[in-house]
Image (cartoon, rainbow, N blue to C red):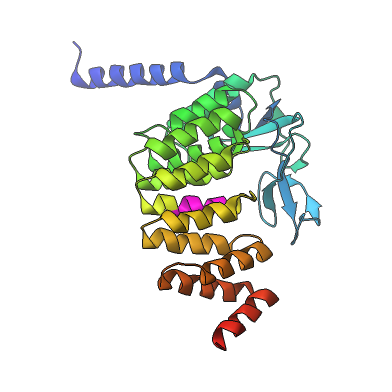
Amino acid sequence: MITSRSMFLLAAAFSAGLASASESELLKQVRQQDGWVGYRVPMVAGHGNSCCYSGKGAGYSEGRGCNLDSGKGTTLSMQDGTDAAAGDLSVYWHVVNGKTDQVRTYSADCPVTSNKAVRWIDPVQSADSIRSIAQWVESGTSTRKGEDSALVAIALHADAEATTTLIDFAATGKAPKLREESIFWLGQTRGAPGADFVERVARTDLSDEIREHAVFSLSQSDVKDAYDRVLGISKSDTSADVRGKALFWMAQMEDPRAQADIIAALDTETSEDVREEAIFALSQLDEKVATHALIMVVRGNYPRSVKEKALFWLGQTGTDEALAFIDEVLTR
């Protein structure tokens, strides 16, 4: 006779069998022994070195290297890269009591230490690595910090499946934080395919906050027309907040057209909030350029409130030209 308890146990065993069957072979291999487990895969090109740098100031010159057991005293830095081919990426999983609880990634040439020897399981296919990391994220067993590091790990894989996976995580209906982080890394590391998706989100998503975040992510992209894409959004989005933030990020992109384009927005914008954001954006340009632009606004045919904001930020620049102009205004 099959009792209700028997049925429960059978159902539980069946569920466990499904979970085990669905787990990737790579994760099974990783979980075979507690401690740190590592392997290498090709790293996405153009994004420099991922390592830990200790010390203060530019370059963190006091030391380079990561300790897997503790990140104390180190700063993780993804240095600017070039278009040259990248090297390999080292992926490290941490296993406790047969369960994975961390995944970290560093450039393969980054010196890494640990209290116990890392167990290496090369060779591993990039696609298998990406799917396993994604499966770990989807399992819901990772912490918020763990999820973030997992998304970084996926983004740094050279394989095109990394882009597909991040796009899936960024889709409508997924958790907002997961979407935001995925959108960021798509813009940061995934080239034209990533930028195309991020721009689509920035133009069509129903959430003003997500669109605003997508504009920021788009401004971080290395595609040649990233500035033009952000400029287009600054002119067309229905949200004043999004348009204003687009102007701000234009000022951060070091494009020589930014000054003229932001000033042009002052001529066409009807939102006081966006105009205020435009003035702040001008103040973020190169010091000399910002000074010149803000003086132009004060002297131009703009509402008094706009000129007051320009005069305020002009004072913050502290340049000789700015102070001389303010003295001139005050002595009229």
Residue 204 in view (yes/no): yes
Quarter containing the N terminus: top left
Q: Would you identify the image quadrant in which residue 61 lies?
A: bottom right
Of residue 286 and residue 207, the one placed in the foreground of this image is: 286
Is residue 279 inside the magenta stretch?
A: no
Task: Indicate the position of residue 198 as horizontal and vertical percent values.
Answer: 48, 35
Q: Main secondary structure of the magenta part?
A: helix
Quarter containing the C terminus: bottom right
Q: Residue at x 74, y 51 (%)?
A: 53
Query: How many marks are shown on the rendered structure?
Result: 0
Left or right: where does residue 295 sit relative to residue 199?
Answer: right
Task: Indicate the position of residue 194 as horizontal and vertical percent values.
Answer: 54, 31
Is 47 rendered above or below residue 69?
A: above
Of residue 162 and residue 229, the one placed in the foreground of this image is: 229
Q: Residue furthest top?
A: 1
Is 197 rendered above or below residue 252?
A: above
Q: Residue at x 37, y 63 (%)?
A: 272
Q: Residue furthest bottom?
A: 331
Left or right: where does residue 116 sit relative to residue 228?
Answer: right
Of residue 321 and residue 302, the one placed in the foreground of this image is: 302
Q: Would you identify the image quadrant in which residue 285 lies?
A: bottom right
Q: Residue at x 25, y 21 (%)?
A: 8
Task: Indicate the position of residue 259 as horizontal and vertical percent values.
Answer: 58, 56
Magenta part of the chain: 244-251
Task: Indicate the position of residue 48 as horizontal and vertical percent values.
Answer: 73, 39
